[in-house]
Image (cartoon, grey):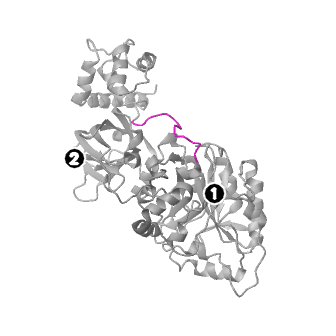
Amino acid sequence: MSKQSYRVCLCFRRRFKMAVAQAPEDVKNLFEMYSENGLMNVDGLHKFLVEYQKEDETTTDDAQKIIDGSKHLPKNGLHVEAFFRHLFSDTNSPQVSLGVHHDMNAPLSHYFIFTGHNSYLTGNQLNSDCSDVPIINALKRGVRVIELDIWRNSEKDDVHVLHGGTLTAPVTLLKCLSSIKEYAFVSSDFPVVITLEDHLTPDLQAKAANMITQTLGDILFTPGSEVFKEFPSPETLKKRIIISTKPPKDYTEAKEDKDKENDLKSDKADDEVATKKAEPHENKPKQKKAPEYKRLIAIHAGKPKGGLDECLEVDPEKVRRLSLSELELEKAAETHGKQIVRFTQRNMLRVYPKGIRVDSSNYNPMIAWLHGAQMVAFNMQGCDKHLWLMHGMFKANGQCGYVKKPDFLLNTNEIFDPEVKHSEKTILKVTVYLGEGWYYDFDHTHFDPYSPPDFYVKVGIAGVPADKQMTKSKIVEDSWVPSWNQEFEFHLTMPQLALLRIEVHEYDMSEKDDFAGQTCLPVSEIRSGIRAVPLMDKKGDKYNNVKLLMRFEFTNPS
């Protein structure tokens, strides 16, 4: 070991001993309860894991492995420092580690699906570059729906991907398809859906169809002329890529050119643009359709003419995908809430950001999830709080990108009414003990050039309106290892849709408080007991060392 590594190790030991010295009374009392003569043997540790941590499946062999993995002597048990190290270790995760454990044999419409919006953009919606890099990054994170806007190039002989009517620099469709094929299943074996916003003439649709079939090969799911009465399941579509778009209509180039010129002027917030772009021009000769392209479409999209009642009509003979902007959904939810839920039991609903979000920000996904929308499309290149919620939702079910919708959204006998307030189902008690790791992951003058930081924690629930809440801890001044020892209580009416939000900030009297970490956890998968909660940066990437020691307890309402 080098001298520098040795000094780092000594520094880490000193600071961890400081954390042990600040260990909450709950931890000290638990150690005393399950130990003898200052040592917790294998039986005591096993008893602690089963009784207190509620890890019913844990065996004495599992407890022995924890002891054997401790770097501290003696090997026949844990002293208080080793016990505290275990509580703060990565193995003591706050979330159940069951892998994929939802039923994956139901139709695709029964799942929330991790969905991207304008997946090819590297930054804002107006003048950032288009690239396959954000597509690759999204697939690595577990995104299962990739959106590509396809246009003809300036020479009218190739297909480009770009945000039409803007200054975004294009990338070729072929490059995007090649990267999707290479990275589609690095994070999950479950299907990837490519949603195409199609602005092509029939000859280029045929060219795009050839690119798709040649590039994706056997992993492309091609239904041919079949129209589904019910969507296939994620299980049957494992390792397959699916195309979803509107079936091609007749175009004229004159109409398309006019649409391209006017696209930037149109507000995508009202987004009837998506349905109007490809409508035929009445006074121009029509071109032939591209049958090869049409045969590739597995999930048919489209917005029927007429009002909401026509859009939300359920056809027992076929299923389809409907797209609504966030504003359209909000308006529809006010008058057609139950109809939306009924529609999404069989059909797909994709919700996308309003057009004025040129900074690639996002919206609150909860209203869409509450109405059963499967594809809540998000700009993945940002780092806003709503994206943290999206990351939190899809930490569930082994992070496979598919989360089974709660049963109440799938009950066809009694359609769920999102407007009705429901009774309490559970109470979640959250205790924030202390934090550790900023000293190693941040420059020592990052928060304050002259003194240690002043940390506080925000803990809350994102969920249905009745469950939504955010609370704040006290500020612990001048400490790299802050100890809060505060309990918060949340009364939940729909824990199935609730996400626990956790944020740490550093108080600044004269300027905006500094960000110091965040995470978001699906309440349905939180483990009871004392847990080490790793924090993420603004982009959702895990810090190397920053963690909170927290306790979670579920109780029934009285």
Give the residue at mark 2.
475
Residue at the farthest front position: 413
Using the image, tell me which numbered label, if any, was put on residue 194: 1
Q: Nearer the viewer, residue 483 or 356?
A: 356
Q: Which residues are magenta?
A: 94-106
In this image, 55 relative to 428: left or right?
right
Task: Identify the residue shown where x is 25% and y is 19%.
Answer: 33
In this image, 48 relative to 108: left or right?
left
Q: Residues within 10 Å of mark 2 (few under 14, many from 20)?
A: some
In this image, 526 relative to 195: left or right?
left
Rendered position, 115 above or below 126: above
**Is the stretch drawn in magenta largely helix, strand or loop?**
loop
Q: What's the residue type where badge 2 is placed? A: Ile
| Spatial CA span between label 2 and label 1 | 47 Å
Q: Quadrant of the C terminus?
A: top left
Q: SS for tag 1? A: strand
Q: Nearer the viewer, residue 108 or 86?
A: 108
Residue 205 x, y percent position in the rendering = 74, 67
Rendered position, 234 above or below 380: above
